[in-house]
Amino acid sequence: MEADVVVVGAGLAGLVATAELADRGKRVVLVDQEGEQSLGGQAFWSFGGLFLVDSPEQRRMGIKDSLELATQDWMGSAQFDRDEDFWPRKWAEAYLHFAAGEKRAWLHEQGHRLFPVVGWAERGDGRADGHGNSVPRFHITWGTGPGLVEPFERRVRAAVASGRVTLAFRHRVDELMVTAGAVTGIRGRLLAPDGVGRGRPSSREEVGDFEITAQAVIVTSGGIGGDHDLVRQAWPERLGTPPARMVAGVPAHVDGRMLGITQAAGGHVINPDRMWHYTEGLRNWDPVWDNHGIRVLPGPSSLWLDARGRRFPAPYFPGFDTLGTLGHIMRSGHDYSWFVLTQRIIEKEFALSGSEQNPDLTGKDVRQVLGRVRKGAPGPVEAFKRHGEDFVVADTLDKLVRGMNALTGDDLLDVESVRRTVVARDNEIDNDFSKDAQITAIHGARNYRGDKLIRVASPHKLLDPKAGPLIAVRLNILTRKTLGGLETDLAGRVLRPGGEPLPGVYAAGEVSGFGGGGMHGYNSLEGTFLGGCLFSGRTAGRAVAAAL
C-alpha cells in the first residue's frame, strides 16, 4: 500500500489528524491494531471533560476567568524544571491560547455542544501560585466521550466514502521504515479478524505481513497505562513505592509499543517518569476489560483515611491534588485508602467517570439529567454501592469499621481510633466557619452556584442518623495517563536526541505527552487530556498537509 500519510492509532488524536489531512486533499491510511469497533480509542470511554478558559458557560455561572489566571494555574501545576522542558513549555503556552481562543468555536462549528454547568476539578494544593484550578474549568461534553468523537469520526468516514482515507484495522505496527535517515513508512503484522466487543481483549493471532509507504507518518498510538509492568518501571521515587495492586483505567491494548518503535527509528522520548494515575479507583462490578477500574469523581466532603484509619492531611482532600495524594498513599505502606461518607454525600457528590457510567449525559437525555438535582443517587452510583466489592454500608460506625476490616482481611482499623477522627471532624460542623481546612473548603465550594446546585452536599455530621446510612469505599490506584513521551516541536515533528527533527515522522496525543513530550509537566488541571489530543492532532495534521 502507498499513501501520502500514514496515521498510526485510531483514537481521538488520530481521527483529528486524519480529518485535517483529508480535508486538505491528502491520501491517508489510518492504521490500528484493534478492530473497527474500537474506533475512537479511550476518548469514547471518557466523561468528555474539556478545559476551556473564559467560556460563555463559565460567565453564565458567574465565573471570572482569564488567560492570565489559567496560565498561572498551568505553570504552577506543571512546575517545569528540566532542560528538556523547552518544547513542553512551548506546547503548554500554545495550548492555553487555544483553550482561551478558538477551541470552543472550532468544536461548536462541528456540532459539539456542552453541558451548561461547569465542573471544578483539581481544586489544588492550597497555594495561589501552586497546583490546581483557581476556578471551575471542567466543561462536560453533551454526549460525553462518544459526543466528542462523533464529529471527527463523521469527517473521517466521509473521507473514506470519497476515497481519500483508507481504514486499516487489525494492522499491528512493528517497525517504522527508515530510508536514508528519513521515515518512509511502516511495517508490521496483520492480526486475525476479531469481533470482540469494544475494549475487550482481542486475539493476537498473526495471519500475515504488511508494509505501507508514505511521505510522512503520524504516530498517535497512546500511552502505557494498559501495561502495569511498564507503569511500575517508569514509576518515580517522588510518588513513593509502586503499587503492587492497581486497577486498569484503560484496556490492555494501550501498551506503549509505539514509543519504543519510534525511539528505535531515532525519535527521542523525554519525561518518562511523569504520569497521571488516579487515587479513587473502584473495581468495576460489570467489567468491560480485564481488571477494569472506574474512577470516582468526588465532591469535597468525604472523610479520607489511609489503610490504617489515619486522616489525610491538608491539602489531600477529595478532588484537590491527585498526585500529591497519590504520593501520600504510596508512602503509607499500603496501596489503597478509604472514603467514609453518608448516603446524603453519595447522592450529591459521587459521580463516576466514563461514558458508560453516565447514560443520561451520554444519551443526551434531558429528563434524566434533571433527575440529578432530585433526591437519590444516580443509578450507576447506586449499582456500585449494591454490587461493587469496594463498598461497605452500615447503620453504625462499629459495624462499618468491622465491615471495612472484613473487606480487606488486614484488620488494620481500630474502631475507637476511627471514632475519634470522625467525632473530631463532626464537632467542626456546628458553625459556618471552622479551623478544619476541609470543612472550610466545603463552605467555600458552596459559594459557587454549580457546586451548591449539583455537586456539594450541605455540611452535616457523618454520625447524624438522618444523613445515613454510613458508607465506606475502598479506593484503589487506577492507571490512566502518560504525561511524558515523544519530544516534538510546535509542528508536531518528532525530534532526535540532539534536538533536530527526525524526517518523515510526527506525533500527537498521549504518545507525545499530548504535545512536546509533556506539556502538562508534572500535573494535570483535568479536562486537558482530550483537549491535548484535539490540539496536537489538529496541529500535526495541518503541519503535515502544509509540508507535503
Image: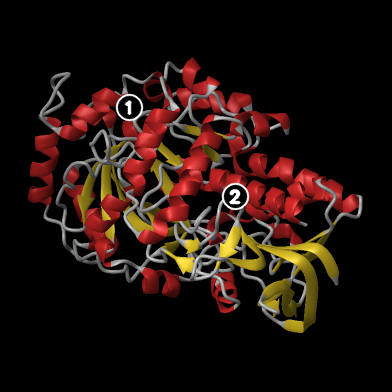
Earlier in the chain: of badge 2 and badge 1, it is: 1
The mark total stands at 2
Question: As drawn, is 267 to the left or to the right of 506?
Answer: left
Query: What mark, if any, has residue 457 been given in the picture?
Result: 1
Relative to 200, residue 110 above or below: above
Instruction: State which quadrant residue 434 falls in.
Output: top left
Task: Name the residue rendered at 19%, 30% in the picture.
Answer: 439
Tell me: residue 476, above or below residue 169: above
Residue on which the image places disc 2: 536
Locate residue 6: give its quadrant: bottom right
Residue 449 falls left or right of residue 208: left
Identify which residue, 118 or 482, lies in the foreground. 482
- Foreground of the two, 78 or 33: 78
- Badge 1: residue crowd in 10 Å (few <14, some 14–19, many ≥20): many
The C terminus appears in which quarter of the rendering? bottom right
Q: Nearer the viewer, residue 256 or 215?
A: 215
Element assignment for label 1: loop
For marks 2 and 1, give the one nearer the viewer. Answer: 2
Of 160 and 462, which appears nearest the observer?
A: 160
Residue 112 screen position, x and y as percent: 67, 33
Q: CA–CA distance between discs 2 and 1?
A: 38 Å
Q: Residue at x 20, y 51 (%)?
A: 401
Tell me: 286 left or right of 190: left
Is residue 136 something that shows in the picture?
A: no
Label 2 residue SS? helix
Relative image position of residue 11 (x, y in whole percent): 65, 55
